[in-house]
Amino acid sequence: MLLRSLAFLCLALLPQFAHASSEPLAENVMAEVMKDLSAPYTPQEKLAGKMCLNGASVDGFQGDIIEYWANLECPYCDIKEPLAAQRDNPNLCIVVRHSPSASYGESVKKSLVYETLMQLSPNAAHQFWADILPEKGKGVPVPYEAALQKALDSAAISTDSFVATLKNQAETVSKDIVEAQNLISTTPTYIMEGIRLPACDFTAKEIPSALALAKRIRSHKDDTIHELIEIIVKNITEDGTV
């Protein structure tokens, strides 16, 4: 029953995939950053109803909010560093958003599993992610069925509870996929202060520093936009996206 429910929901979501086009790198990065800065960013409204990595609700959160767009089969989209940053910074809320790719066969399915587990046990959700995607692709990932069963057992979640919750998460993942079509060109992508930082797989210590830079740029306190452009270009180039 569990696997049949997953298969049905994934088939419903797959047709919504889209592929982003590429343009000359430096100019494109600057243009996209300026585009982001030209629009107000209201994460409390945009992310209403979503959860931080620690299980807290975005609704009513008073600190800084970061979006972490990921693909659970992308070897650079690990949960370890964002989770460590969340734990070390109580005034920070990191929200996972999903941008699956058609080139990864089970990425939609894994996104659905992760979001469902987040509703039932954030710790189980993070363990599931860590099991299916060893850091930077090192080692052999656990098949998602086994990783899911391990997560359910560790949090004492019944199959019936999982399936009932799963059905409500299809809309969450679907909305992410639709938004990603015109917003996300690669994973991982962080959104800080409304500014997209594609291909940036930051360490836990780098995340607050990058956020501080984005906040300075958004508030026009100093001319650090070129520093941000260099970070993005460097990461995109090393990622092999272009």
Image: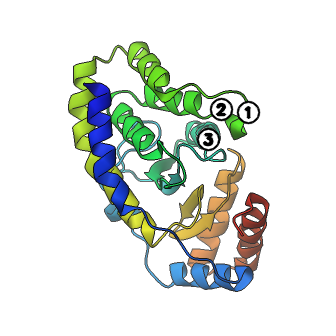
Q: Amino acid at mark 1?
A: Lys
Residue 227 pos. (x, y %): 76, 73
For the residues labelled 1 and 2, say whether their Cβ atoms are less than 8 Å apart. Answer: yes
Residue where numbered disc 1 is placed: 138
Residue 140 pos. (x, y %): 67, 27
Residue where numbered disc 2 is placed: 134
Kindly state the secondary structure of the residue where label 3 is placed: loop
In the image, 155 versus 219, the foreground residue is: 155
Tell me if mark 2 has few (under 14), some (14-19) or many (20+) residues whose alpha carbon lies within 10 angstroms of its own: some
Mark 3 or mark 2, which is nearer to you?
2
In the image, 95 versus 65, the foreground residue is: 95
In the image, 155 versus 144, the foreground residue is: 144
Q: Amino acid at mark 2?
A: Pro
Residue 224 pos. (x, y %): 73, 77
Residue drawn at point x = 27 percent, y = 19 percent: 159
Name the quadrant of the C terminus.
bottom right
Q: Amino acid at mark 3?
A: Asp
Indicate the quadrant where residue 165 lies: top left
Q: How is the image coloured?
A: rainbow
Residue drawn at point x = 44 percent, y = 21 percent: 151
42 left or right of 194? left
Compute the Cα span from label 1 to label 3: 11 Å
Compute the Cα span from label 3 to label 2: 8 Å
Residue where numbered disc 3 is placed: 78
Name the quadrant of the N terminus.
top left
70 above or below 179? above
In the image, 103 versus 201, the foreground residue is: 103
Residue 5 pos. (x, y %): 26, 34
